Amino acid sequence: MQDCEGTGLIGNAGNQAKARVKFRNALATGDYFISIGIASRQSEEIVPHDRRYDSIHFVVEPTPKLLGLIDLGASMEIEPVIVDV
């Protein structure tokens, strides 16, 4: 999910944002890990600022039938967080 519309609107220094990723869990049985990170794009270069590998772990219970590859149909929403000072 490299291209998230609207993220440029909240990408100023000192701003906070909340991201929500939704996907349909159609995975095969097993343990899965999610890695997250934040980066910016400067012209054609992607500059990573922070990365957390395997920071979220979840287990998919046995699935009755599953064949082939999975399309998670993932979507992401990002919204600014208003901080009272």
Image (tube, grey):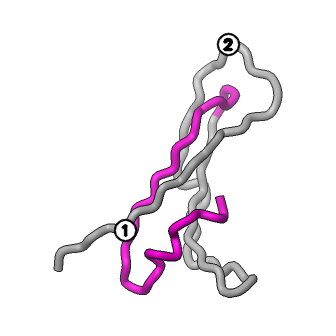
Q: Give the overall secondary structure of the magenta segment.
A: loop
Q: Is residue 82 rendered to the left or right of residue 50? A: left
| Span shown in magenta | 1-30
Which quarter of the rendering shows the C terminus?
bottom left
Percent x, y for residue 3? 65, 64
Q: Is residue 8 rendered to the left or right of residue 79? A: right
Q: Quadrant of residue 53?
A: bottom right
Q: Quick one: SS at disc 1?
A: strand
Please tell me whether residue 44 is drawn above or below residue 27 in the rendered image: below
Tag 2: residue type? Pro
**Residue density around tag 1, few if under 14, some if 14–19, many if 20 or more, within 10 Å:** some
**Residue density around tag 2, few if under 14, some if 14–19, many if 20 or more, within 10 Å:** few
Tag 1: residue type? Pro
What residue sits 40% from the left and 68% below the top?
A: 17
- Mark 1 or mark 2: which is in front? 1
What residue sits 37% from the left and 78% below the top?
A: 15
Disc number at residue 64?
2
Percent x, y for residue 32? 63, 41
Q: 56 or 9, which is in the foreground?
A: 9
| Residue 20 colored in magenta in the image | yes
Residue at the disc numbered 1: 80
What residue sits 66% from the left and 86% below the top?
A: 42
What residue sits 52% from the left and 76% below the top?
A: 8
Percent x, y for residue 70? 74, 35
Q: Earlier in the sequence, mark 1 or mark 2?
A: 2
Q: CA distance from mark 1 to mark 2?
A: 41 Å
| Residue 39 colored in magenta in the image | no
Please tell me whether residue 37 is drawn above or below residue 15 in the rendered image: above
